[in-house]
């Protein structure tokens, strides 16, 4: 179990592989995918106000038969709600039909209003309405700025992360400051899965290119949230805990473009 979770800087454990649900339709598509994921062993679901499918995510989390406390639910604050983050959070919670979320993220940096937004997230965390708070799409400069006034440090920074979007500076900064890096679009949205060098490494491990990309995240210590609405691919993307990449393979992948 331990290799499948990471300890956040506030002592909360977070699964290392989750299901991303961006661009899944509210209703059947989201409900089926989240249920298949939970049945396949996933315990992390990544949604957002923007995705428009919090109701479906919440319904499955409540009704899957897996205890609520075993499932880690993330949602996010979208910029159009920056003027009233507290109401936006409660609206998300109400759409999800949950008593709390596990992680609440600022979806994009908000240079002018950030301090007030972060203080609201700190209050939500202190009220135990979210078990952890964090950010998304933050570079080193934005993280430094946030850390200059934060009373509670962000637990997670969710960024685009794959060999084709390798943010080494952000990874190193997060590692040095106890912030877990969470990889979005870990499969390059499907665009680079035919890369021949990636394919060669996949063949060597008897795994698929998608599994290699997810493993590359894990071997960098990053959480990965691949999206799929296909039952077989959902299972495939979770079957990544029985191998690891060699330092040479990691290096080769780090420099893929
Ligand atoms: N914070 C942010 O700003 C932000 C931005 C983007 C994404 N995200 C989060 O990150 C999640 C994942 O990123 P993403 O949705 O951009 O893209 P992704 O996970 O990199 O790629 C998803 C694409 O890959 C395909 N796919 C999935 N598994 C596959 C496999 N094993 N073999 C071949 N193709 C496969 C999917 O198609 P099928 O569904 O047909 O399998 C889909 O077209 C999102 O769902 C969202 O939760 C966050």
Image (cartoon, helix red, strand yellow):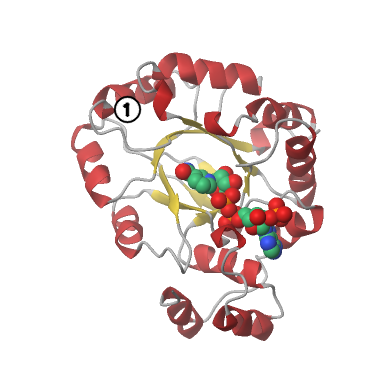
The residue under the point 57% across, 77% down is 195
The residue under the point 49% across, 40% down is 12
Q: Is label 1 in a helix, a strand or a loop?
A: helix
Q: Is residue 235 above or below residue 53?
A: below
> Are there few (<14), some (14-19), or many (20+) residues within 10 Å of tag 1?
many
Q: Is residue 49 above or below residue 38?
A: above
Residue 71, located in which quarter of the rendered image? top right
Across the whole image, how many numbered discs are drawn on residues?
A: 1
Q: Is residue 178 above or below residue 246?
A: above
Q: Is mark 1 within 8 Å of ligand 1?
A: no
Q: Position of residue 105 (x, y in %)?
A: 44, 35
The residue under the point 37% across, 48% down is 179
Q: Position of residue 234 (x, y in %)?
A: 73, 54
Instruction: Tell whether 112 sits left or right of 233.
Output: left
Q: Position of residue 114 (x, y in %)?
A: 27, 29
Looking at the figure, which quarter contains the C terminus? bottom left
Q: Is residue 116 above or below residue 21?
A: above
* 68 and 74: which is toward the camera: 74
Looking at the figure, which quarter contains the N terminus? bottom right
- Farthest residue toward the front? 191
* 42 and 234: which is toward the camera: 234
Q: Position of residue 202 (x, y in %)?
A: 64, 79
Whether residue 51 can be seen here: yes
* 49 and 129: which is toward the camera: 49
Q: Return the residue at label 1.
A: 118
The residue under the point 64% across, 67% down is 210
């Amino acid at each position: 179990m331990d290799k499948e979770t990471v300890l956040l800087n506030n002592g909360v454990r977070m699964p290392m592989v989750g299901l991303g649900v961006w661009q899944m339709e509210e209703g059947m598509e989201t409900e089926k995918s989240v249920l298949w994921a939970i049945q396949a062993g996933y315990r992390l679901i990544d949604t957002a106000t923007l995705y428009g499918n919090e109701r479906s995510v919440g319904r499955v989390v409540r009704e899957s038969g897996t205890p609520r406390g075993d499932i880690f639910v993330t949602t996010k604050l979208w910029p159009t709600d920056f003027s009233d983050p507290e109401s936006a959070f409660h609206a998300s919670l109400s759409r999800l039909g949950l008593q709390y979320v596990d992680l609440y993220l600022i979806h994009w940096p908000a240079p002018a209003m950030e301090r007030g937004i972060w203080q609201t997230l700190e209050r939500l965390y202190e009220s135990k309405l979210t078990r952890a708070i964090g950010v998304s799409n933050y570079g080193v400069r934005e993280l430094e700025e946030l850390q200059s006034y934060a009373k509670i440090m962000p637990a997670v920074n969710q960024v685009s992360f794959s060999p084709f979007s390798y943010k080494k500076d952000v990874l190193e900064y997060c590692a040095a400051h106890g912030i877990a890096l969470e990889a979005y679009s870990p499969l390059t949205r499907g665009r680079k899965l035919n890369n021949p060098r990636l394919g060669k490494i996949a063949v060597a491990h008897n795994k698929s290119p998608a599994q290699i990309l997810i493993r590359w995240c894990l071997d960098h210590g990053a959480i990965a949230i691949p999206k799929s609405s296909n039952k077989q691919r959902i299972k495939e993307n979770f079957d990544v805990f029985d191998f690891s990449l060699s330092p040479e393979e990691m290096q080769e992948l780090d420099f893929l473009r």
